[in-house]
Amino acid sequence: MLRPLHTFGRHPDSCRTVLQESDVSKLHALVRWSGTQWEISDQSRNGTLMDGRRLAPGHWHALAVGAELRFGTSTSAVWQLVDTSCPRTGLWPLEGEKVLRVLDMQENLLPDPAAAESNVFQSEGRWWWDRMDHVVPLLDGHVVQAGGRHWEFVLCEDLGVTQDLPRMTTSPTLAAPVFDFDLSQDEEHVCLEIHVGSQTLTLGERIHHYTLVTLSRQRLHDAERGLPPSSQGWLGIEALARMLGVDVPYLNIQLFRARRQVQNALGSALAVVERRRGEVRFGDYSFRIRKCGRPEGDWKAPGL
């Protein structure tokens, strides 16, 4: 799977594709995307052949579909270019059919939306892997797994990065966020605002906001019962799905979307939904719940 600038050679620290043939140089050849086509440049002592013709070293030569490449004089390894489309950020399957899964910047449910176990998305110019129990940044070459399947993360520069929501103004030290939920009388509509210091960010009305409200209410109920903060708010995934009248895969999708929306808005990997052994809860962040503008309850995070 070619990167925008791809190196072939014998040295494992400087080459993306490591070649084992004895006459291959440490850095043998470069392949790049010029913006309109793929090109190759020989950097070796023993030469690079394209369609049986030795390339002039140090010059860029256009590559076409079906082009056959040999690095050095050995005939044991012949490489063929099978796809000349532009480089894209995606997931390269390590098993099964080798077809790049091009990534959407907002949501990529794995292994598929019908059985979502994790989500890959972009926020603040970086790619993240939401494994539900925690969110980790992705670097080129990292392996992502879900549902018994494995992919290599292929990172290419993406132009025109957009966000679906406004974001908080960046600051070296942001205050702890406060989540403000506002429900309609019939609870068919839930709006969410996040307050950070003097800033207020309106996240609008989303289906997954009701999922967050349900988890917040459980935390509030447990606090009123006198449970310690570490034990407050935990609900089994299946129990929560029954409460919301949905199936577990759909619930997982709502949880992934809620976490992504909050991270995109605040620019940091907040654990707005925590998970443990088949249970989830609203994270350690203060919140207020209002119904038709009237206070229903509020909860303050420990230490605030």
Image: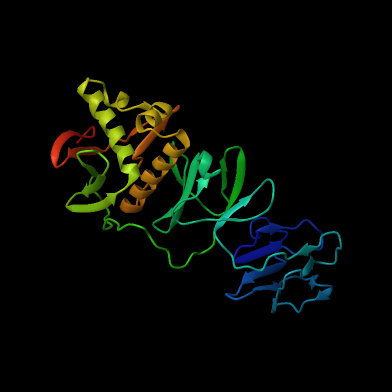
- Relative depth, front residue between 63 and 23: 63
- Quadrant containing the N terminus is bottom right
In the rendered image of this protein, does residue 202 appear above or below residue 299? below
What residue do we see at 27% from left, 26% from top? 229
- Quadrant containing the C terminus is top left
- List the single residue furthest toward the front: 186
In the rendered image of this protein, does residue 190 appear above or below residue 277? below
- List the single residue furthest toward the left: 294
Q: Left of 106 or right of it: where is 41? A: right
Q: Position of residue 276 (x, y in %)?
A: 42, 29
Q: Position of residue 50 (x, y in %)?
A: 79, 72
In the rendered image of this protein, does residue 13 appear above or below residue 67? above
Q: Left of 211 or right of it: where is 276? A: right
What residue do we see at 51% from left, 64% from top? 157
Q: Left of 220 or right of it: where is 48? A: right
Q: Position of residue 164 (x, y in %)?
A: 36, 58
- Colour scheme used in the picture? rainbow
- Relative depth, front residue between 137 and 162: 162
Q: Left of 243 or right of it: where is 196? A: left
Q: Position of residue 88 (x, y in %)?
A: 56, 62
What residue do we see at 26% from left, 38% from top? 285
**Number of callouts:** 0
In the rendered image of this protein, does residue 78 appear above or below residue 149? below
- Relative depth, front residue between 30 and 144: 144
